[in-house]
Image (tube, helix red, strand yellow):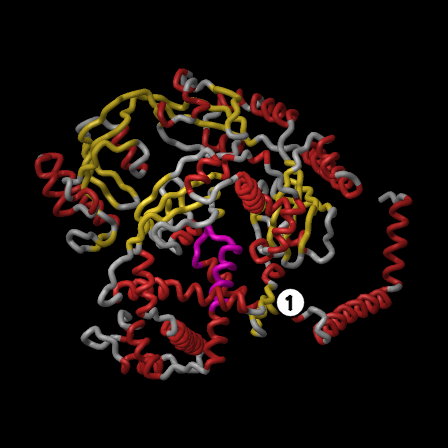
Amino acid sequence: MTLTGSNFKEMAILNSIRKRGFFLILIIALALFAFILSDIITKGTGGGGDVQNVVATINGKELSREDFMGKVENQQRAMGPNSNTAQAMTQVWDRELRSVLLQQQVEELGIGVGEEQINEQLSLVLANNPTFQDENGLYSEAKMVEYVASIQGNDPQSRQQMQLWNDFIENTRESLLQNNYLNMVRGGLVSTIADGEQQYKFENDKINIQYVHVPFTSIADEDVTVSESEIAAYIQANPKQFEVDPMVDIQYVTFLEEPSAADDIAKREAMNGLIESFTNATELESFISTNSDNDYVDRWMVSSALPASLKDTILNIPEGVVYGPYKDNGAYNISKVVASRQMPDSVKARHILVPIGLSRTDSITRTPDQAKILADSIMGVVKQNRSKFGAMVTQFSSDAGSIEKGGSYDWYAYNRMVGPFRDFTFEGKTGDIGVVETQFGYHIIEIEGQKDMSKAVKIATVSQEIEASEATLTEVFSKAAKFEEQARSGDFNAIATEGELQTRPVNRIGALDANIPGIGNNRSIVNWSFEEGSAVGDVKRFDVGETYVIAQLTRKSTKKALQSVAEASAVVTPILRNKKKAEKIRQGITGTSVQEVASSQSVAVKSANALTRSNPTIAGAGTEPAVVGAAFGKAAGESTGLIDGETGVFMVRVTAVNEAPALDNYTSYINTLNTAASGAINTNVFNALKKAADIEDNRASFY
C-alpha cells in the first residue's frame, strides 16, 4: 500500500480525533443539552413552542395537532386513493370548527339533553343493526344493555370496543345538543302574518309603467377615465368587500432533466446494435426480459388493435424480420413479427361453466378433478347431441350472465374474454367444441360464428426509454444552480430572458394551498414562501420530480389585507365607470317629464306592464330592483326622478297600480317563508358564529 501526502494528512486527523475523543463527546453532549434546554425554556415562557402542538384556537378552545391530524388521515383514507391532504384537511376543519362553535353556544346557554332523549335517538340510529334487534327484528333497549355488558372487560379488545361505544354515545349526545340549539334559533325565526301578507303583496301587487332608459353603453368606455387612486379610495371605503387572507405571489422557471439530442442518438445507436441478435434470438421472452423495459406479451393483434407507430408497416413485414428502431412515447423500439394468421374480428360462442368449488346451480362443492370429470362428461353429451346444449346450460352452468341466453355471448371482441377462452374461440373455427380451463373453472365451449376475417400478427418488441445521461443531468443541474446564483443578486426576469427561459408567475397563493399551476401539488414551495425568514425577492431551488424549479417570492402578505388596485380593478372599474357615466348622462338631461327626458337624449319612451317587486325585471332593460322599487313608491300618474340603475339612468311614470285583493289568511306564504328560513338556518348560523369568532388558524404549519 502506497501512502500519499493526502493519506498522511487523513491519518493525522484521525489520530488527533482518537486522542481527543473524550473532549469531543463532552462537547457534543453539551450541545445536545443546550438544544433541549432551549426548547424547554421556549415552551415554558410562551415563546411559540406551544403552537407546535395546537392546530387552531377557536374562542380560546385549542385543537390539538395529534387529534386533528389523526382525523385528517382517517378522512383522507375514507375519501379514497385519489384524495389529497388539502381536501381532507378542509373537510375536517369545517367539521371541527362547526362542532366547537355550536358546542360553545350550547354551553353558554346551558342547553342540556336527557337520557330519555338519547335513548330515543339510539332507537332510531340503531334500529337496522341486528345486534340491537329482538326476535321480531325490532330495536330492543335490553339488547343494547346486553351489548354494553358484553364489551366490558380489561383485555385490550374490550377496552377498544368500549372506547368506540363511549365515543359513539358522546357524538350522539353532542349532535342532540347542537340540534336543540338550532331548533331554538329556528323557533325564533317564525314568520308572522304580517310577513306572509307582505310576501303576498311582493308577488301579486302589480304596476304598469312608462319609462325612459339612457343606457351606460351610450357613452364609450374609453371616454371615461378611472384612475388607480379612485380605485384605491373605493377599496378603502368598502374594506369588507375586498379583504383577503394572507397570501403570496411567486414567479418561477424550470429546468427539466430531459434527454438531450446526444442521448437520443446514443439510444438509437444502442438499439441498432441489438437488431442482429434480436433477429437470431430463439428464446424471445428471455431476450426481451434482458434487453427491454417491457415484458413480452403473447397475443394476436389485428390492424385495429395495433399502436399507431406500427399500424401502417408491421402487417407488411415478413415473419422473423426486425422493424426499427422507431420512436414511440419517449422510447426507442425494435419489433419483430413472430407469427401471422387470419383471425376474425369478433366471435359468437356459447358455453357451460363448471366452477371449481361451489356450484350455483346444484349447490355441490367440487374439487378441480371432480369439476374436470363433470366437464368432460357434459362435453361428451353435447358433442353427440348439440341440441342438448341449452338444457345443460340450465342444469349445470354457473355463469349467471349467459344462462338466460342459453350460454351465448354475441359477437365479442378479442380482448373481452379471459385468455384461454379467447384463444379457443378466436384461433379455432366455427363449429369447434371443447373443454377449456380458466380461473373461473372449466368451460364447455362451442364456437357459433366468426366474422370479418383479417390478418393478425404476434409481435415481439424490445423497448428502451430514452433517458438523460449522467453528462446531461450534470449539465441541467449546473444550469439550474447557475441561474439560481445569478437570480439571487440580479434581475430574475432579465436573467430568464437572457437564458431563453419562460418565467411563470403565480399569484394569490394562500397559506393552505397545495397546487401550483404548472408544477402540481407542492407544499414545500408554499411553506417556504410563508416562512418567517422568507422575504420578497428571495430565490430558492426546489427538486420536483425530474425538474428543478427556481422560484422567487414577488409579494408577501402574512396578515389579512385588502386587495391591491390591480387585483380589485376588474370589479371596481366598471362600478366607478358607470357612476361617472351616470353623472355625464344626468348633466345632458333636460326636462322634468318622461317625454322631455327622452327627447333630450334622443331615446324612445317605452312601456312595461305587470311588474312585481319579487321579480323586478323590466322588458327591454333587464333586472332593475332599484328602479322597480322606486316606481312602487308612486301613485298612478306620478313620476319618479332620475334613477341610477344597473344598466343606465332611468325615469319612470306609473300608469296603473293594481293591488292584489286581501286574503282571508296567508298561511301558504308564511309556510313558504318558514321553509326557506329553516333550510338555510344551519349554514347561516354557522357563518354568523364563524364571523364573530376569534380564530387563530395554524393549520399551514402542519402540512
Residue 93 vs 448, above or below: the answer is: below
Judge whether 163 appears above or below 194 on screen: below
Residue at 38% over, 81% down:
113
Picture residue at 33% right of the left edge, 80% below the top: 117
Asked whether 153 or 642 is in front, the reply is 642
Q: Nearer the viewer, residue 623 or 688?
A: 623
Disc 1 residue type? Gln
Q: Quadrant of residue 135?
A: bottom left
Asked if residue 633 lies in the magenta stretch, the reply is no
Which secondary structure dominates the residues rendered in magenta?
A: helix
**In the shown orientation, is residue 2 left or right of residue 346?**
right
Do we see residue 521 in this rendering? yes
Q: Is residue 194 above or below residue 472?
A: below
Quadrant occupied by the C terminus: bottom right
Residue 171 x, y percent position in the rendering: 42, 74
Q: Mark 1 = which residue?
A: 52
Number of labels in the image equals: 1
Q: Residue 508, how many percent across, how many down?
A: 61, 49
Crowd class of label 1 (few under 14; some 14 to 19; many from 20; radius 10 Å): few
Residue 485 position in % (x across, y down):
77, 41
- Range of the magenta residues? 78-98
